[in-house]
Image (cartoon, rainbow, N blue to C red):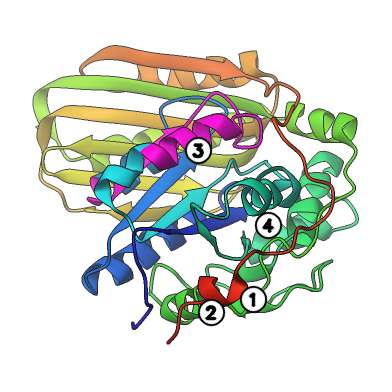
Amino acid sequence: MNTGLNSEHPWFVPIGGFLAAGKTTLLCAAAQTLVSEGHRVAAILNDQGNDLVDTALVRGSGLTADQVTGGCFCCRFSDLLEAAGGLAKHHPEIIFVEPVGSCTDLSATILQVLKRDHADRFRLAPLTVVVDPAQARAALAAHANPDIAFLFRNQVEEADLICFSKCDRETEFPGLPTSAPVRYLSAIHGRGVSAWLHEILSGRLACGRATLNIDYQRYARAEAALGWLNYHARLCLKDPIMPALIVGPLFDSLQRELERKNARIVHLKVIDQAESGYVKAAVSGCGQEPIVEGAVDASPAWEHELVVNLRAVAAPERIREIVADSVKALPGSKTEVRLECFRPAPPRPEHRVAHPQKRAGSRQNSAPF
């Protein structure tokens, strides 16, 4: 890929989309493509809490990564810039930036601010919003949860480019409330990933083409409808067990108990990392077969690092109890590193630029192919 990339003004590549849409999978697949061609790549991930499955997965793949936690990028814009500055010592040519899956209004609070105030630091790629076709059908249905529908629709409306994900599993794609161009890919199989990279790094697509007229009180209510849980523990076993045999029973138990107690799953991810390898399982709704990644045949190990990320339409206290009961059934001794369960605080952006800014130096920002 003849990108004309350089590290003096690295590309800032935002990948948005709803919880479990496939953002991290696309990020990792794109990074592997670029690294294999000799490019330097980094990533910044984001969450309302700490101990992210995705950060563990990205770092486990060997990619240089940082994270901004305790709030969305828009509310911690200074932390985002600090993280990008910290990555500068690695001289990345591309920095992938993945915001919280419930976050919207990214154009006004991040992209327009970068265009206005930091055009000398980054070349901005268009805002790609990754869309899971099954999630889209559910969010756009007449009986959709109104809070999820609100967040989903706003994310799609501000996109510069839409990428339907999981095209290895899906064949039907709903119409979306956006004028942005639509692409189709499967990051797991690599289908469409190189073409997406070429397009977003060409400089031909607008970055931050639109800003939202968003009701922040409604936005706060929508995010607060979700209970968020992050759990991190270390397991020490008397007899070695494969990571897959830790993740599988735990994941099954969590799915079963959440559905039995009417805690609607929006996103559930579990990762187990051992010296022999890792296994990750994830779903983006109730009644789904999990998507499994990693070394499912990794050999048994005595020590395991376990992280659970759960977002559900339920009170935090309820999902905390469900997770605690499921974890209790795991074998061996458990050293809890962190358990946090909460509703997100109302979003309060550090900056907000209401109207799209002209992209400075667009000719210089383009990357010839």
Q: Looking at the image, do the residues carrying marks 2 and 3 touch, with CB atoms under 8 Å apart?
A: no
Is 73 contained in the magenta span? yes
Magenta region:
60-85
Instruction: Indicate which disc, 2 or 3, sits on the residue closer to the N terminus.
Output: 3
Q: Residue furthest bottom?
A: 369
Q: Secondary structure at mark 1?
A: loop
Determine the residue positioned at 42% across, 87% down. 369
Instruction: Indicate which disc, 2 or 1, sits on the residue closer to the N terminus.
Output: 2
Frontmost of labels 2 and 4 is: 2
Relative side of 297 to 191, left or right: left
Determine the residue positioned at 81% across, 73% down. 179
Is 26 contained in the magenta span? no
> What is the three-letter code of the residue carrying label 3?
Leu
Instruction: Indicate which disc, 2 or 4, sits on the residue closer to the N terminus.
Output: 4
Residue 266 or 64: which is nearer the viewer?
64
Q: Which residue is mark 2?
A: 199
Q: Is residue 260 above or below residue 121?
A: above
Residue 5 or 97: which is nearer the viewer?
5
Frontmost of labels 4 and 1 is: 1
Q: Looking at the image, do the residues carrying marks 2 and 1 touch, with CB atoms under 8 Å apart?
A: yes
> What is the three-letter code of the residue carrying label 4?
Gln
